[in-house]
Image (cartoon, helix red, strand yellow):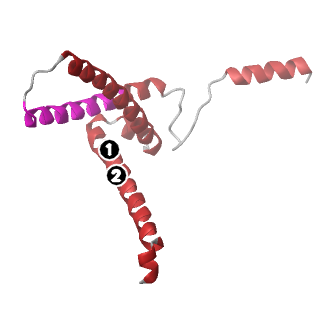
Amino acid sequence: MTASEEQESVSVERKEPVAMSFGGWQNAEKDKYQRRRMVRCIAKVLQNRRSSLQRQQQQLSTALPLSSESHQQETAATRTSLIQVQRYATKMEHVLYVSAMTREEYSDISTLQMRLRMIANGIQSCRRSSASSRNAAWFTTTPAAAQA
């Protein structure tokens, strides 16, 4: 093979899409439209959850008229909130994508909320165990613990 033929084959290889396989059924290139749709579904679920929590907070707080400055702050907070929801949705979608055994399991909208709760609970339990291990380490390294 000549140098020019070798360069051509390398350039052709680079143009082909990279397919990542996790559980056997995943294909990053083929699944990209389905994954985008799933991110939108997850974002909608998260946004609905956040909206219901905000409504509950508003009902608990006293209804005070908003000044123009507080209205601007609220608008900026809403934009930030939407960006955060999109980030969370993308991360959660990735977890769903790599952990699903089949494409049907991944795309099952009827179980989406339950699977999202499972992810969120897993994250919370990881944070709790991490915090408790940090606390345990602190207790074992304090001078009072050493003297006992």
Q: How many residues crowd mark 1 within 10 Å: few (<14), some (14–19), many (20+)?
A: some
Kind of residue sitting beneath label 2? Gln
Q: Residue at x 34, y 31 (%)?
A: 85
Q: Nearer the viewer, residue 122 or 107?
A: 122
Q: Nearer the viewer, residue 72 or 8?
A: 72
Q: Position of residue 14 (x, y in %)?
A: 71, 23
Q: Position of residue 124 (x, y in %)?
A: 34, 51
Callout 1: helix, strand or loop? helix
Q: Residue furthest right?
A: 2
Examine the image and state in which quarter residue 116 appears: top left
- Magenta span has 69? no
76 horizontally vs 64: left or right: right
Q: Residue at x 81, y 18 (%)?
A: 8
Q: Which mark is residue 124?
A: 2
Kind of residue sitting beneath label 1? Arg
Q: Nearer the viewer, residue 122 or 57?
A: 57
Q: Position of residue 96 (x, y in %)?
A: 41, 40
Q: Position of residue 5 (x, y in %)?
A: 86, 19
Examine the image and state in which quarter residue 147 appears: bottom left
Q: Nearer the viewer, residue 62 or 123?
A: 62
Looking at marks 1 and 2 on the same chain, the residue that comes earlier in the sequence is marked by 1
78 horizontally vs 88: left or right: left
Which image quadrant: the N terminus?
Answer: top right
- Specify the segment rendered in magenta: 40-62
Q: Which mark is residue 115?
A: 1
Which image quadrant: the C terminus?
Answer: bottom left
The image shows residue 138, relative to residue 109, as above or below, that is: below
> What secondary structure do most residues of the magenta stretch adopt?
helix
Callout 2: helix, strand or loop? helix
